[in-house]
Amino acid sequence: MEGRIRRPEIALIAALIGCAHAPPEVDVASVETPVRAEVGENQTPPVRKSCKGRGPRIPDGESATGVVKAAYLIGADGRVREVSVTGKASAGALKAIQRFIASCTYAPALREGKPVPVHWRGEFDFTTAPVTR
């Protein structure tokens, strides 16, 4: 019987393999609400081009509930800087949301046809689907 794997061992191996995968990304595309800030007359707002992943990767043991608010600067080059995140979430979840926002790129805001930096705000609404890991 040596060299053969028994059923309980197979179940344990399968469970360990399942745990080894990276945590799934939280799909927040449906809950993120961009809110304009500092976009004046003769100025077009920035347009998000892409972000790394479909949403923040909330680590195991971390959680987010309610509305999480973010404020950040979109530079004239379309890169996100100075991200500030607040709301009902654990420190690890807030950090994950902050990293996700920082990974995004935008077509910058334009004033009189020239790219300009703009302060921007957004909200993530976790009230309908709280995230707990």
Image (cartoon, rainbow, N blue to C red):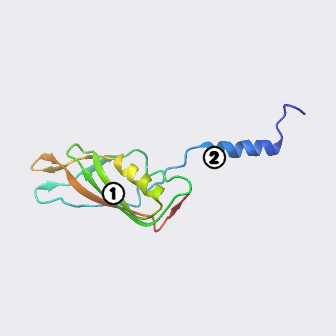
Residue 122 as seen in the image, left or right of residue 39: right
> Is 131 left, or right, of 30 in this rendering?
right
Screen quadrant of the C terminus: bottom right
Q: Confirm or deny contact between disc 1 and disc 2 (CB under 8 A).
A: no
Give the residue furthest to the right.
1
The disc at residue 64 is none
Image x and y of residue 33, in percent? 34, 61
Numbered tag placed on residue 19 in the rendering: 2
Using residue 10 as the reference point, say whether residue 49 is left or right of it. Answer: left
Number of numbered discs on residues: 2
- Identify the disc placed on residue 84: 1
Identify the residue at image location x=49%, y=50%: 25
Residue at the image position 81 percent from the left and 46 percent from the top: 8
Q: Quadrant of residue 43?
A: bottom left
Distance from disc 1 to disc 2, alpha carbons, whole Å, reads 32 Å
Residue 12: x, y in percent?
Answer: 74, 45
| 36 lies left or right of 28 | left
